[in-house]
Amino acid sequence: MILILSNDGDLSVDFVVNWLRFYKTKFIRINSYDLLDSKFIATNKHLIINEQKIYPKEIKSVWFRKFGFFRESNHNRILETIVSPSASNHIVTEFNRTLSFINFLFKDAFWLTNPNFLPLNKVKVLALASELGFKTPLTYIVNSKSDLLSIFNKTPNGLISKSIYDPYPLVLDGDKYMMFTTQITNREINSLPDLFIPSLVQEKINKEYEVRTFFLEGQCFSMAIMSQNDKQTSLDFRKYNYGKPNRYLPYKLSNDIENKISYLMSKLGLNTGSLDFIVNKKGELIFLEINPTGQFGMVDFPCNYGLHKKIAELLINKFSNESI
């Protein structure tokens, strides 16, 4: 049997589930809110949820897909409007320990994304990628206005800033906020205090286009994103221009790069994830980051790779003795 650990409203999971039903494969999907909205019992031998008993030995494949909203979302902030911050932190910790125990119960199954290797540290991943031969942007973590100004003045193409950790969108007073990549200007530097919280800055790379690669068990499925000619998306393609969308094209990385990706993912303990690159004006591929549970539908549909079907078949093949 296949176990899917997901969040409510994840369309990628919905599409994979449709394929599992097409193949008449038994599966159980547990969404984060099921642990709050349904009856739930966990012991060291089984789980009971929605009156269904799940034994670890019956689960051969587990797909971990953004499971656990307290882990990476804003619910702890909402809790703080109801209870004290210390009580909120305790509740969050309690819930996360429950999630950790659920993961432990199915430790002997095949995992597509093992939560034990999450979350990633963006700066550590950049350092490892550089060691493996990828070209990476000059990257600094800085907390001093004078140091930032010095770096700014010696970086001809300018600097950008991005978060070290990419959470789900922040929700404050009902409004949703995204952590986008932004360009640093003299005006912003001058407005800073002498010391500030350590922050990630990188050299800005003048790009020809971006590349998003979805990695799945040793295979790479890549897409070129023509985001460079639109001011709205030139720094961060996630600032989608719905009126005039970027072009998405199937893209083939070199065998050398794909081999390096496989080795990098193996070193990180990951068997799937989304990788972001930039191709600069010299035609060089620059590694940016990895999102282990990143969206892959945006690669799948424009490039017709059939990734939802491939994930369903992978989970089935790990679960069944007969390959599809």
Image: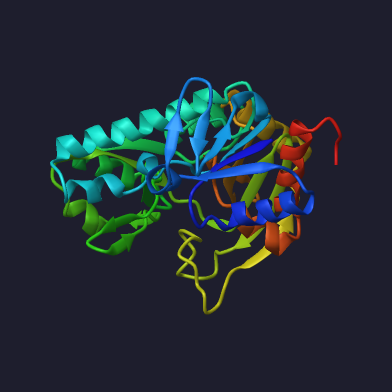
Q: In what quadrant of the picture does the N terminus appear?
A: top right
Image: 137 above or below 45: below
Name the foreground residue: 273 vs 161.
273
Q: Can you say whether 187 is above or below 275 in the image?
A: below
Q: Quadrant of residue 101?
A: top left
The location of residue 146, given as percent across then percent down, is 20, 40
- Residue 44, horizontal then vertical, whole percent: 48, 20
The reply to whether residue 127 is visible in this rendering is: no
Between 220 and 206, the one nearer to me in the picture: 220
Name the residue located 68 percent from the left edge and 29 percent from the top edge. Answer: 60
Residue at horizontal 77 percent and vertical 54 percent from the top: 22
Label tally: 0
Q: How is the image coloured?
A: rainbow
Q: Is residue 41 left or right of residue 29?
A: left
Q: Quadrant of residue 285?
A: top right
Taking the image as shown, residue 145 lies to the left or right of residue 119, namely left
Residue at the spot x=65%, y=30% of the render? 59
Give the percent coordinates (x, y) of residue 234. 49, 63
The percent position of residue 25, horizontal first and vertical second, equals 75, 44
Apparent side of residue 178 relative to residue 243 in the rendered image (left or right): left
| Of 313 and 214, the residue lying toward us | 313
Question: Does residue 178 lie above or below 34 as drawn?
Answer: below
User: Quarter of the image containing the C terminus?
Assistant: top right
Q: Is residue 123 visible?
A: yes
Using the image as rendered, state which of residue 26 and residue 204 is in the foreground.
26
Residue found farthest to the bottom: 243
Q: Quadrant of residue 322?
A: top right
Pick out the residue farthest to the front: 51
